[in-house]
């Protein structure tokens, strides 16, 4: 029997917000606005403050995945020399760019005027991805290098990393002044950061933390879906309004004891990135009365609050403190804490083909978290958006076996 | 010449047995340097022996519990295996540089499972496009120096560092002369021979290696150009972080010869010299920045493609073989740009992917067919 999971009403509002935003993007030329393609964890507020419209290529690839065109776009990039071992998001986005006006992308992103990439997800591939796209479109690419803080990093290393990132952000601001031929609008930057910070606080309390309730009013599917405004509208009041409404709706579910999954028996944690099968995975788990209540990924795309009167420093701190920018022990601690705080029964830990920053940590993290908490995990291989490297049948069998394991543990 | 080559082969094949004996006899420390981009001169100046960790041929039974073989390349898995199975217990320390996505994670995993006294990850700038990023190179080299000094409880003087730079520069000059001989006297040295000589140098004192290479050069320079029907001239590029002996032996067997390369266990290791007349840390940093293009450094998107293409044109090579290690994302990401450049220049190019098992039978046939095709043209 097909499981239907209750949708939050906000999802319908978000759909319209996106239709409007993408219309704005497609009208950018007429309205004399510039378009920037930006990596997912970049301080896009720096660009919004100078009236750039933002596109996130990672999100674009996820959209292509949801629309069922990503695999073909990946094949296009492979025909042009890109290895199938590379990240699926990258291959998809590059395939779309190579197709130009003939792209299969459902949103047909307008070409960038400028690209910004940061390395705080510790992904060399994203640097290369953006480098390749900037070459295809022949546009400037700004790279902000965020040094990795491994398990041996000291306070001095943190301060040195912070200083370096601040210098680069300031260099970027000078570049923007030259590029736009306007003085940089620091007041507007603070305004953008205030909206982003307020949106984050509402998202964190109203959505992310709400999942601590038993039953959880939301699932990981909701966490991913409702990330959208945090990315695209983070510097605008619309994001604040959106998450305020969303928080009210979720709190209402909490008050009514309404769970995202009817008759929630098991609570699961997704230790991995957004990928095409989240909706079907959520439904599959729900068929076993299991709710994927939370995960690591959504925490990565947010601007934690800080001193908005010092915007460059706050953005630099946010960049170096991102979980993906930290070593193995920090990740183990983060997952352990979330597992305990959210009363998790099991962890789903996919190895995402081509995604080294997340997948490489997976085995060690899961083994250690299980040792510390006793919570078992399930591992399988999949891909971000390329259906050739995912087997629904295999995942179903693995999930079934995992749920049987959880059932048996519950009986003891 | 054969006798001298045997000494290089012995050093390469013994892998770590010779080193353990040397350590016992000398009482000195040995530091494992994970490929690539480690400024070995700083380790050498501290009176320690830097060696390169270049994987091994044995069974992998431990490493895949920590790193997936569908995520990590064979070099990382093999080195981690040696860490976990105790092969590298004799080391006094390890140094990594975050040249790819997986090395920072490898470093943290290694830290959890080993007990080396010195464990250091160099966090190098991802790009070299700004004054701040270039300054960061010097900072990271100073940080490594400070970590070694703290561990040894002894300062590394500028004088010692300049001396080490001199020793390494001499090694680079000697190896460059060897490669020049390979180009000028085709048939005298095989591609595999050169790889053996360079590899051996990564597993012994540079002073000893310098003596051996000088000896070999003396013997070679006196030999006439052998008569051979080797007429296919190749450039070989890539194979980052490790050797590609399985590819080189096919090239040798097929009768082609290599004019120039930018292989890690090849010219990449020794092409650029360090300035011996300025502050030594600044000199090492300058070498890092100005070294031959590398996909580990984002300076100019087309730099590596232009470098490779220019090698083919300058040396009038017949074609180029690009060796890409499976799961090496930094190389895989640059390859389309390189391929376009070569295709636009009408330069015949063959890309071969290598993994743990070396080159596949199918790819051996492709290399042979490529060389045959070039020979006909």
Image (spheres, helix red, strand yellow):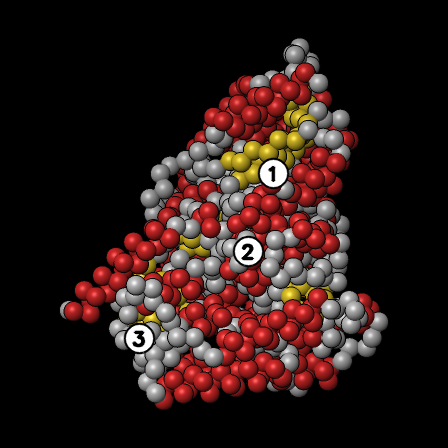
Q: CA separation, marks 3 and 1?
A: 55 Å
Please give the label number shown on residue B238: 1
Marks 2 and 1, how far apart in space? Answer: 25 Å
Instruction: Bin the neighbour count of mark 3 within 10 Å (Cα to Cα): few under 14, some 14-19, many 20 and up.
Output: some
Subunit of label 3: A
Pinpoint residue B377: horizontal percent, then vertical percent.
71, 18
Give the label on residue A312, or none.
none
Q: CA distance from mark 3 to mark 2?
A: 33 Å
Chain of the residue that carries numbered disc 1 in the rendered image: B
Give the mark toward the camera: 2 or 1.
2
**Viewer-nearest of discs 3 and 1:** 3
Query: Against B366, is A199 above or below?
Result: below
The quarter of the picture where residue A54 lies is: bottom right
Name the outermost residue toward the top: B227
- At x 62%, y 68%, the residue is A42
Q: Secondary structure under badge 2?
A: helix
Q: Are marks 3 and 1 on the same chain?
A: no
Residue B139 seen from this side: no
Image quarter hosting the N terminus of chain A: bottom left
Q: Is residue A77 visible?
A: yes
Q: Secondary structure at mark 3?
A: loop
Is the same chain shared between marks 3 and 2? yes
Residue B200 in percent (x, y) is at 53, 34
Q: Residue at x 58, y 21 (%)?
A: B369
Residue beneath the point at 34% across and 82% down? A258
Residue at the spot of label 3: A262
Which structural element holds mark 1?
strand
């Amino acid at each position: 029997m097909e499981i239907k999971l209750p949708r939050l009403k906000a999802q319908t509002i978000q759909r319209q917000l996106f239709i409007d935003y993408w219309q704005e993007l497609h009208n950018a030329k007429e309205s004399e606005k510039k378009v920037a393609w930006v990596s997912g964890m970049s301080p896009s507020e720096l660009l919004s403050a100078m009236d750039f419209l933002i596109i996130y290529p990672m999100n674009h690839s996820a959209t292509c995945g949801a629309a069922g065109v990503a695999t073909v776009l990946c094949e296009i990039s492979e025909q042009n020399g890109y290895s199938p071992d590379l990240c699926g998001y990258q291959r998809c986005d590059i395939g779309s760019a190579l197709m130009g006006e003939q792209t299969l992308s459902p949103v047909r992103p307008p070409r960038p005027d400028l690209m910004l990439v940061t390395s705080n997800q510790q992904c060399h591939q994203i640097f290369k991805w953006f480098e390749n796209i900037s070459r295809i479109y022949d546009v400037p690419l700004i790279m902000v290098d965020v040094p990795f803080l491994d398990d041996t990093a000291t306070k001095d290393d943190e301060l040195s990393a912070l200083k370096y990132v601040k210098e680069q952000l300031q260099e970027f601001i000078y570049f923007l002044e030259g590029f736009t031929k306007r003085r940089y609008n620091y007041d507007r930057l603070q305004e953008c950061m205030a909206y982003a910070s307020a949106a984050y606080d509402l998202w964190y309390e109203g959505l992310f933390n709400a999942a601590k309730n038993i039953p959880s009013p939301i699932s990981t599917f909701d966490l991913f879906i409702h990330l959208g405004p945090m990315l695209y509208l983070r510097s605008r009041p619309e994001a604040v309004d959106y998450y305020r409404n969303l928080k009210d709706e979720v709190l209402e579910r909490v008050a009514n004891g309404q769970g995202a999954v009817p008759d929630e028996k098991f609570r699961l944690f997704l230790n991995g990135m957004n990928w095409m099968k989240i909706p079907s995975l959520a439904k599959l788990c729900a068929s076993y009365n299991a709710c994927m209540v939370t995960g690591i990924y959504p925490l990565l795309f947010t601007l934690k609050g800080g001193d908005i009167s010092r915007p460059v420093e706050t953005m630099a701190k946010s960049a170096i403190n991102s979980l993906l920018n930290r070593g193995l022990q920090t990740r183990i601690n983060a997952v352990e804490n979330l597992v305990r705080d959210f009363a998790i029964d099991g962890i789903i830990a996919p190895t995402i083909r081509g995604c080294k920053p997340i997948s490489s940590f997976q085995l060690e993290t899961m083994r250690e978290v299980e040792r510390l908490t006793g919570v078992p995990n399930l591992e399988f291989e999949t891909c971000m958006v390329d259906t050739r490297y995912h087997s629904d049948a295999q995942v179903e069998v693995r999930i079934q076996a995992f749920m049987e394991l959880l059932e048996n543990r519950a009986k003891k | 010449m054969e006798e001298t080559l045997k000494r290089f082969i012995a050093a390469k094949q013994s892998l770590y047995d010779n080193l353990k004996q040397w350590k016992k006899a000398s009482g000195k420390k040995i530091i494992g340097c994970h490929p690539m981009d480690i400024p070995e001169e700083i380790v050498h100046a501290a009176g320690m022996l830097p060696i390169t960790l270049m994987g091994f041929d044995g069974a992998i039974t431990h490493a895949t519990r920590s790193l997936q073989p569908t995520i990590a390349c064979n070099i990382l898995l093999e080195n981690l295996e040696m860490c976990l199975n105790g092969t590298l217990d004799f080391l006094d320390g390890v140094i990594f540089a975050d040249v790819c996505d997986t090395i920072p994670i490898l470093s943290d995993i290694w830290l959890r499972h080993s007990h080396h006294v010195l464990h250091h990850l160099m966090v190098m700038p991802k790009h070299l496009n700004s004054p701040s990023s270039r300054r960061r190179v010097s900072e990271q080299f100073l940080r490594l120096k400070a970590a070694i000094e703290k561990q040894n409880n002894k300062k590394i003087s500028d004088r010692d560092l300049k001396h080490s730079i001199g020793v390494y520069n001499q090694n680079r000059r000697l190896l460059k002369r060897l490669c020049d001989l390979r180009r000028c006297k085709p048939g005298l040295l095989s591609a595999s021979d050169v790889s053996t000589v360079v590899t051996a140098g990564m597993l012994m004192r540079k002073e000893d290696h310098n003596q051996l290479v000088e000896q070999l050069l003396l013997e070679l320079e006196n030999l006439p150009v052998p008569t051979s029907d080797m007429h296919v001239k190749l450039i070989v590029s890539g194979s980052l972080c490790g050797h590609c002996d399985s590819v080189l032996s096919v090239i040798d067997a097929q009768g082609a010869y290599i004019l120039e390369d930018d292989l890690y266990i090849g010219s990449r290791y020794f092409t650029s010299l360090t300035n011996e007349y300025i502050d030594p840390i600044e000199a090492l940093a300058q070498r890092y920045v100005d070294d031959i293009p590398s996909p580990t450094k984002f300076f100019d998107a087309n730099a590596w493609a232009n470098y490779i293409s220019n090698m083919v044109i300058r040396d009038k090579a017949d074609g180029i073989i690009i060796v890409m290690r499976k799961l090496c994302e930094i190389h895989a990401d640059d390859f389309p740009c390189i391929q376009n450049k070569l295709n636009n220049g009408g330069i015949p190019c063959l890309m071969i992917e290598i993994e743990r098992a070396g080159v596949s039978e199918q790819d051996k046939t492709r290399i042979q067919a490529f060389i045959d095709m070039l020979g006909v043209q």
